[in-house]
Structures are given as C-alpha cells and as structure tokens.
Amino acid sequence: MTTERAPQPTTAAANPPVQPMASNLLPTDLVRISATANVPAPERQLTKVAKLIDVSKCIGCKACQTACIEWNDTHPAVEENVGVYENPHDLTPEMYTLMRFSEYENPGTGDLEWLIRKDGCMHCEDPGCLKACPAPGAIVQYSNGIVDFISANCIGCGYCVSGCPFDIPRIHQTAHVSKKCTLCSDRVAVGQGPACAKACPTQAITFGTKDDMIALANERIEDLQSRGYDNAGLYDPQGVGGTHVMYVLHHADKPGLYAGLPADPRISPVVESWKGTTKTVGLAAIGLAAAGAVLHGIFAKANKVSAEEEHEAEELVVKTASAPVPPSSVPPENRGGL
Amino acid sequence: MRREYSHEGDHIEALKPVVTVSRYRGITRANHWVTALSLILLALSGLALFHPSLYFLSGLFGGGQVVRWLHPIIGVVLFLSFFLLFLQMWKLNLPRREDATWVARIGDVMAGHEEKLPELGKYNAGQKGVFWAMTVLILVLIVTGLMIWEQQVHLWRDYAPWAATIPARRIALLVHALSAVGIILVFILHVYAAFWTRGTLRAMTRGNVTGGWAFRHHRKWLREVARRQNTPPAE
Ligand code: HEM
Ligand code: SF4
Ligand code: SF4
Ligand code: SF4
C-alpha cells in the first residue's frame, strides 16, 4: 500500500486530512545541515512558510503555550509566583514559547500600554544557531524555512545558545540536548499548521505561506495605521535574511519595547569570526606546523652530543669535585675562549 | 650553597661509563606525563568540535556527547597538574641576561653551533618561552573553558553574572578556540625540540641526561650541580 504524501499546509485553521498520510518533509528537503559542508541541492523547493504573530491582537491568554506543551509533550516545572505574568519565568528546555509582558508608558499619549509578545524561535533564514553548532546534523533547515533541532545528533554543548541572536535555545540539563520551538515541523510534515496557531482564540497567531503572511500583515498594518498607530509595521528582520516567524508590532520603530526584541538582529561578528577565519587559519597553522616539524625531523641534521663533549663533561665534573671548598662562585659567563 | 641554576634534587648520578646527571625526580616526571596526556586528550577532543572535518575524532572517545562531557573534566585535570609543575619549575624559568643573547643568535641554535652561544642554566630561552606560553595559555583556556562549560555554569553564575551573558560567552568561545590553536602550536614546537635535541627525551623518561648533553646545552647548570656534589652537608 502506498500512502499519499501529505499536502503542504497553507493555513493553521484548515482541518487536516484525516486519512493516514506520509511525511512531506524529507531528508532531501534540507538546505542547511549543521557542521556539514556541501549539502546536496534539494530536488524540489517547498513553499516558504511563516507564522505571523499579531501582537496587537494578542490577549495574553497563553493558550498557545498550553497547546505547545500538549503537542510536544513537554513538562515544564511548576515554579513560584513572584508577581509577574510570565509563567514560567523564562524559556526552558520544556517550554518552547513564552508570553512576555511589558508595561510601557507612551510619552506621546500618556497611555499605559500592556505589550504582550509571544517569544520563541524566529526560524531565521540565516540561523546563527546552525552556524555555531559543531555536531553534524544536530540542526537542520528545510527548504520551507523551518529550522529544526535533531536531538539524536545533538551533543548538548550549548554553542547554539551563543550563536542565536534571539536568546532562544535552552539546554536540557538531564537529557543534555538543546531544545526550542520546532515550528511544529512534525505537524507541518503531515499537512497541519502549528499547534499554537491552531489554539489561538483571537487568531493573533496565523500560519501560511510566507507571501500570504506578509500580505495579511500588510492588511493589519494598514488597519492599525488608520486607527492611530502610525508606526505599526512588520518585524521580519533582514539582518538574519528575514524570519519565518514574524510579528506585527504597533511600535515597529521600537521593537525593544517588546521585552527587548532586538532592533537589528544579526549573527554576531564574534560568532562569524570564531566559526570563519579562526577555523580555516587555525587548521592551516596546525597542519603546516605539524608537517613542518615532521619534514624537518626527517631531513634536517639532528642536534647531537659528541663523544668529545661527554669527555669534557667528565673532566669538568671530576675537576670541580677535587676543587677546594667553597668553589669559585662566579662561573665564566661565556665559553668563548674554549 | 646558593642554588641559582639548578633544582635542589639535581645531582651527578654516575661518572662511568659516561657522566649521568639526574634532571627530574620520579614525581616530577609523573606530573609531566599526566600533564602531557591531558593536553593530548584535550587537543584531540577539542579539535573534534573545532572543525567538522575533524568531528570523526569524537569516535576515539565514544561520540560527541562523551566529548562534550569529558573535555572540560580533563581540562580541570590539566590545570591542576600543570599548576603543580609550575610550582616546581617557575623559578628556573625566570628570564636572565643570557636569554637575550640566545634569542638573538637563534640562527646558531638552529645550525647546532652551540659553541657560539652563552653558557646556560637548566633552561634555555626557548624552553622558558614554551613554559611561559603554556602557563598563560592554560590560564586563558581554563577561564574561558569554565565560561563555556554549559553544564557547570550554574556553579558560578551567581557570583559573576556578567560572565554568563551570551555576548561574554561568544567572546569566550572565540578566545578558547584561538588559544587552543596557540597551545597546540606550542605543543608541536615543544615535542619537536625534544626530539631534535638528541638525548633530551630521557630526561623525562629515565629522569637523567648524559654529562655531554648537559655540557653542550646547559653548562652553567652542570657546573652548579657538579659543584654541589662537592659541598659538604649543611651544618
Ligand atoms: C584548561 C581547561 C579547559 C577547559 C575547562 C575546557 C573546556 C572546554 C569546553 C567547555 C568546551 C566546549 C565543549 C564542551 O562543552 O566540551 C571546549 C571546547 C574546546 N576546547 Fe577546551 N577546555 C580546556 C582546555 C583546552 C585545551 C588545553 C585545549 C587544546 C589543547 C582545548 C581545546 C578546545 C577546542 C579546540 C575546543 C573547540 C572550540 C571550538 O569549537 O571552536 N581546550 N573546551
Ligand atoms: S531564532 Fe535562534 S534558535 Fe531560532 S533559528 Fe534563529 S538563530 Fe536559530
Ligand atoms: S547543543 Fe546546540 S550547538 Fe551543541 S550540538 Fe546541540 S544543537 Fe548543536
Ligand atoms: S510552532 Fe509548535 S513548537 Fe513552536 S511554539 Fe507553536 S506549538 Fe510550540
């Protein structure tokens, strides 16, 4: 029996196909693989997908967090209430997405604004996590834009944490693997949208092709601007080549208001030089030094002690031993005369 | 009698058939080899993560997860072991006037014309350079290594939160990788010099060298050791 491949999902809300279907995210759809040069060109190009998070529509209900926990079967620890709305206090290896709450007193209007942003992996077109990762195949990127962590290949070193411009990956302290939002790659593979998008009661989270999501965002931005949010705009930062999770922000001119969303994220130049020049130059230097040492060792004349020197040493020792005590305290600085 | 060029344990072992001079005690040799083995294992395990083309080296240890776990532990062993070596050797590695001459005449060193060089104590300027380079690089590697040790960051994060930030970790990763390259280059130089200068290796295997070797390379050291043979025990 051949099972049909699932269609590529284009909305979050659409009911999924109910008949059994084969995964439509194949190993041949990978465009990037961590610590792997020369990834073969994929045979097909999947439609680029994106999740759009309209911050202006979010009511902070955390249905998405709940859906994410349920779908991914994670078990975030029960924490203590310290009087803030974030729960848990930060992203964890068991909590891939987190509502972050910021209070902002708008100097223009005098209003107190409650800005709520759903934090999580941005699925960068140019992912810093993947660039930093030393383990072949631990981080992969599909041609539809999804960046996925493959725990079976992950060694838990935490390099991805340093590589990510958004402070997203978290290392599981007992499983020793890195965890983050998968963009529900396992759902997308079988024609379904992400669990968080599906659960969102206000459709603040939507999912579809990247083009559709940009078009939808533009509609929303136009609406917001007509209602006084002059700086409303789309967050799709080009410093990382654009992202496959995008935000509609009322204050797109100040993304930092939203719990420190970076204004111009890019892979840190420190990471670039660590994974770039350092590696090529370092490897070449070590290779040359090792080869040079071996060649010099084989072809150059060794530094040998002569029989005469052995003899002179014996004389020196015997003479010193028979010298009166105490012996001369100042040895000749130089043997030039010998 | 004042010791200026030798360690207290250095002594003439025998006169016949050739003079042999004891250079390192057993405990110092054991200390040296623990340090050397740690450094080799660190280089192999570190290089596995350094470049994808060397990831296969992780197979020597049982896979990437083991490398991630083991490398920093060996790092701590190396640090402690080298620290003990440092305590024994730092004094005789302090720079002296004749070191400048030795460096200026490096051409004669390479050509083996040691008769044109000044007499030296227990270490020449090259050996001293290796010693201090290792000291500095190991310090840098342990500090940056602790900063990027994902599993143990919680041990110190509360005392130096700034060092646990992501920008600080990025710098630590870069510096760790650069100093790792540096220490591997120093290591190659060190091993090569020990082979090229025939008669040196036995100092760290058997613990002694021949009189001729000492006469040729470290005559001030030999003179002082020989003179001490002659000194009656302290009253
Ligand atoms: C002195 C104590 C040291 C400590 C605590 C330490 C710790 C670490 C840690 C935590 C990592 C990240 C991978 C992991 O989690 O295992 C690492 C990577 C590495 N270490 Fe060390 N290390 C030390 C010494 C050394 C030495 C002596 C060398 C070289 C001989 C070395 C070479 C490397 C290399 C090449 C990497 C990979 C860097 C990269 O991916 O660019 N380390 N070390
Ligand atoms: S947000 Fe961070 S973890 Fe997600 S793809 Fe970008 S770099 Fe990787
Ligand atoms: S912890 Fe991150 S960088 Fe390290 S192997 Fe896993 S995915 Fe790659
Ligand atoms: S896309 Fe999936 S994994 Fe990512 S936050 Fe939403 S539910 Fe969680």
Image: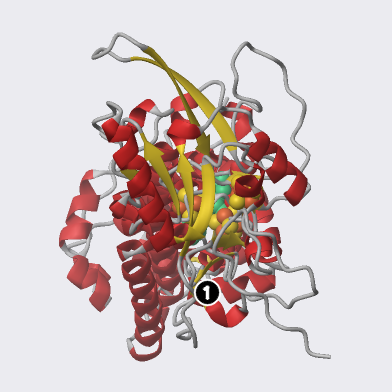
Q: Position of residue B122 (x, y in %)?
A: 41, 52
Q: Position of residue A262 (x, y in %)?
A: 35, 38
Q: Which residue is mark 1?
A: B54
Which colour scheme appears in the figure?
secondary structure
Q: Position of residue A279 (x, y in %)?
A: 38, 66
Q: Nearer the viewer, residue B163 or B227?
A: B163
The answer to whether residue A219 is visible is yes
| Amino acid, disc 1 | Leu
The answer to whether residue B94 is visible is no
Q: Nearer the viewer, residue B51 or B219?
A: B51
Chain bearing tag 1 is: B
In the image, A2: left or right of B110? Answer: right
Residue at image location 49% in from the left, 25% down from the top: B161
- Quarter of the figure with the N terminus of chain A: bottom right
Q: Is residue B121 above or below residue A330?
A: below
Q: Nearer the viewer, residue B109 or B3?
A: B109
Q: Count neighbours of disc 1 (C-alpha within 10 A) and say few if under 14, some if 14 to 19, many if 20 or more.
A: some
Q: Secondary structure at mark 1?
A: helix
- Quarter of the figure with the C terminus of chain A: bottom left
The part of the image, by quadrant, that contains residue A297 is: bottom left
Residue at image location 36% in from the left, 26% down from the top: A257
Residue at image location 54% in from the left, 40% down from the top: B146
